[in-house]
Image (cartoon, rainbow, N blue to C red):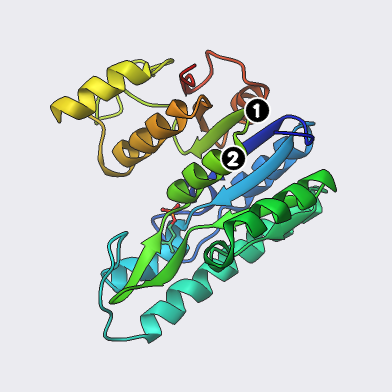
Amino acid sequence: MDGIGALVIVKFGGSVITDKNHPLSLNQVALDSLSKTLSMHPSKKVIVHGGGSFGHHYAKMAGLNTRCKFVDDIKQIALIRKSMLELNAHVINSLYLYGLNPYTIAPFYWSKSLNGLKALLYKLLSQNVCPVFFGDVLPCNRGFKILSGDDISYFLCRMLKPSRMIFCINVDGIFPSSNMKGPIIRELDPKVVEKIMAKKSSIDVTGGIVRKIKIAYKISKLGVDVFFVNGSKPDDFFKALNGEYGVGTCMRGMK
Ligand code: IP8
């Protein structure tokens, strides 16, 4: 990134920082471990976090996903947003305690001015402030929709061209089958992923992770290396921050 130095964008998966089996439950240990590892790494960082058992819990109740939908009971929208702000407060608190100087930027800022957002990010990063984004609920034409933290990550990669993008997930990487058996795929060749997606067959991975792989593919097309690592394994996370191949699953940026 021009004049800023090495930049890494990190997505804290909701499945890592919360317990998805219990509504509104934080995984403080995992969150603090991520913050601690980040604090030991010298690169500039931008953090994005997902919704886990906070935002997704209420989004499900409202029947919302990434498509625009009319919502009868507007209270549901307030609940989604409130829960995301609560989760964000936990994330900010942890990052702050580990000295990362977090600064939340809510998605509405984007619609105001992209140039303004870019200037703000440069300013914050140059002063050792760590921008933090979160998946959110946004108004759209005829209702509301969920803006995923994965989409925010792609958007930020396009804008900032980081050295690498790291998705912290709750398993050791991408498995070759949906039953999570078999050795982790260490390197996903974007050209192979391209063919698999075109054929609409699958390397047999499920829901959320398929979408993540598609986004990773789009990010790799920007020339940015993408890593999927277990967010509960500090060593793996640190190696990915360093850009070391052979940890988790990597999709190298297309040059
Ligand atoms: O977990 C979703 O973000 P994600 C955010 O990154 C909400 O998909 C509000 C459910």
Q: Residues within 10 Å of mark 1 (few under 14, many from 20)?
A: many
Asked whether, in this view, residue 178 is left or right of residue 7, the answer is left
Question: Do we see residue 70 in this rendering?
Answer: yes
Eyeballing the image, is 212 above or below 136?
above
Measured as percent of width and height from the top left, residue 107 is found at 54, 63
Q: Nearer the viewer, residue 223 or 211?
A: 223
Tag 2: residue type?
Val
Which residue is rendered at x = 71% and y = 35% of the image? 37
Question: Do we see residue 203 in this rendering?
Answer: no
Eyeballing the image, is 191 above or below 116?
above
Measured as percent of width and height from the top left, residue 246 is found at 52, 13
Q: Quadrant of residue 91?
A: bottom right
Q: Quadrant of ligand 1?
A: bottom left
Give me the C-alpha separation between circle 2 and circle 1: 9 Å
Q: Quadrant of residue 40?
A: top right
Which residue is rendered at x = 59% and y = 40% of the image? 10
Measured as percent of width and height from the top left, residue 33 is found at 67, 41
Eyeballing the image, is 127 above or below 164?
below
Marks 1 and 2: in contact by CB < 8 Å? yes
Which residue is rendered at x = 55% and y = 33% of the image? 165
Marking on residue 10: 2
N-terminal of the two: label 2 or label 1? 2
Q: Residues within 10 Å of mark 2 (few under 14, many from 20)?
A: many
Judging by the rendered image, the residue that carries numbered circle 1 is 241
> Number of numbered discs present?
2
Measured as percent of width and height from the top left, residue 7 is found at 69, 34
Q: Nearer the viewer, residue 223 or 212?
A: 223
Tag 1: residue type?
Leu
- Secondary element at image label 2: strand
The quadrant in which the N terminus is found is: top right
